[in-house]
Image: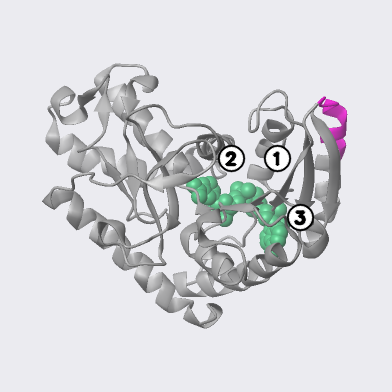
């Protein structure tokens, strides 16, 4: 048997946590022969609910679950972590400005970045899901002294999966036929699901779907607004699909990317595609199973460039709004 991997999850008593923990402990995330330790982090008022989640995890009697530790202490929660999944954050409430939300959540991610640096394994990789996830990731990364920037990610995989499913439905094919779908920029309403480089059965989407007005209009807005549509229909935000996005992101980072394809995840920009260095922006990524790299040379036409620039401008504004939380 392999040595267990330690996974820390914040917001573990929330909706996404509920859907995610069983996927980790059942082997969906790291494979059917990889034992896991789970360290579940919550705020004090949610510790009772977390206890209930832990009882259910016990009742699953997962063969791969080695240990489960519920805690509201960040140092204990991130101790020895190989992966830190930062899901918990404070939702936007009525009357709250975006800047207020950035400030409130920013403070959470300052402390979590510091606690990761102080307690986790040196190779720890961090995936931020809690919104605004790109900028929360930026804050955590800049407060995690000694942990390389390449080990920080923010999730746009749910958006990629949503976009693939919309294109597949329009073309009347299975979603597995859709490849090379990149979400560019911010995980927000400005994100750009790039249909110009995506493929269906190896052909450019634009050759398969001739309805350019649909691609530029309804397709993009459906992907951008899918979260809101799910809230309207379900009365709660997406949870199972978000948890699935986390599993897919980590599998894509830890297994080789299929030849010729790429996947979307927000990473620290090195200046590629004119995205200012240091911003956490979603780009096309390939992995060899250990290390990842940004795919270079993806062509952006004028339409794509305008969309990407708008999303990057929003990321720059967010960075400006939280600059006090980023040590220089
Ligand atoms: P819930 O409100 O169900 O759960 C959030 C949990 O986080 C709560 O249990 C809360 O007690 C906990 N929490 C709050 N502050 C914390 C802190 N400082 N430390 C530890 N735990 C803390 O939300 P849920 O539906 O699970 O969504 C979680 C986050 O994911 C939200 O910010 C949401 O906006 C974001 N999402 C991000 C997505 C993405 O693609 N990046 C998509 C899905 C989701 O909307």
Distance between mark 2 and mark 1 Cα atoms = 8 Å
In contact (CB < 8 Å): disc 2 and disc 1: yes
Say which element carries label 3: strand
Tell which circle, 3 or 1, labels the residue nearer the N-terminal end. Answer: 1
User: Does the closest atom of ligand 1 sit within 8 Å of the Cβ of label 2?
Assistant: yes
Q: Quadrant of residue 201?
A: top left
Q: Is 168 positioned to the left or the right of 156 in the image?
A: left
**Which of label 3 and label 1 is nearer to you?**
3
In magenta, the rendered stretch is: 55-63
Q: Is residue 86 visible?
A: no
Q: Quadrant of residue 43?
A: bottom right
User: Does the closest atom of ligand 1 sit within 8 Å of the Cβ of label 1?
Assistant: yes
> Residue 122 placed where, x, y %?
68, 57
Distance between mark 3 and mark 1 Cα atoms = 13 Å
Is the residue 144 above or below the residue 239 in the image? below
Q: Which residue is mark 3?
A: 41
Q: Which mark is residue 239?
A: 2
User: Residue at the spot x=18%, y=48% of the render?
Assistant: 300
Q: Is 162 positioned to the left or the right of 87 in the image?
A: left
User: Does the closest atom of ligand 1 sit within 8 Å of the Cβ of label 3?
Assistant: yes
Mark 3, other Cα within 10 Å: few <14 / some 14–19 / many ≥20: many
Tell which circle, 2 or 1, labels the residue nearer the N-terminal end. Answer: 1
Q: How was this image coloured?
A: one colour
Mark 1, other Cα within 10 Å: few <14 / some 14–19 / many ≥20: many
Can you say which quadrant of the picture contains the N terminus?
top right
In contact (CB < 8 Å): disc 2 and disc 3: no
Q: Nearer the viewer, residue 78 or 52?
A: 78
Q: Which residue is mark 1?
A: 18
């Amino acid at each position: 048997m392999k040595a267990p991997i330690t996974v820390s999850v914040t917001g573990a008593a929330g909706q996404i946590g509920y859907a995610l923990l069983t996927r980790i402990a059942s082997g969906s995330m790291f494979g059917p022969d990889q034992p896991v330790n789970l360290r579940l982090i919550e705020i004090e008022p949610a510790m009772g609910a977390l206890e209930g989640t832990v009882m259910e995890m016990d009742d699953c009697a997962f063969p791969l679950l080695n240990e489960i530790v519920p805690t509201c202490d960040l140092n204990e929660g991130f101790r020895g972590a190989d992966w830190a999944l930062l899901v918990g954050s404070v939702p936007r409430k009525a009357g709250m400005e975006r800047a207020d939300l950035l400030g409130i959540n920013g403070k959470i991610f300052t402390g979590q970045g510091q606690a990761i640096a102080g307690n986790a394994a040196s190779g720890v990789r961090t995936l931020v899901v809690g919104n605004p996830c790109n900028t929360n990731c930026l804050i955590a990364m800049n407060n995690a002294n000694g942990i390389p920037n390449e080990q920080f990610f923010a999730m746009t995989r749910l958006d990629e999966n949503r976009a693939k499913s919309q294109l597949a439905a329009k073309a009347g094919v299975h979603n597995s036929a859709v490849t090379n779908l990149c979400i560019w920029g911010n995980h927000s309403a400005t994100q750009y699901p790039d249909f110009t480089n995506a493929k269906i059965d190896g052909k450019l989407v634009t050759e398969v779907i001739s309805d350019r007005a649909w691609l530029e209009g309804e397709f993009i807005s459906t992907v951008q607004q899918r979260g809101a549509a799910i809230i309207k229909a379900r009365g709660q935000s997406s949870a199972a699909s978000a948890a699935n996005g986390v599993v897919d992101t980590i599998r894509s980072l830890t297994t080789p990317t299929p030849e010729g394809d790429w996947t979307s995840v927000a990473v620290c920009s090195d200046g590629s595609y004119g995205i200012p260095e240091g911003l956490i922006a979603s780009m096309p990524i390939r992995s060899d199973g250990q290390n990842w790299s940004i795919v270079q040379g993806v062509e952006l036409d004028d339409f794509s460039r305008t969309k990407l620039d708008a999303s990057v401008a929003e990321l720059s504004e967010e960075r400006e709004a939280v600059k006090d939380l980023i040590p220089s």
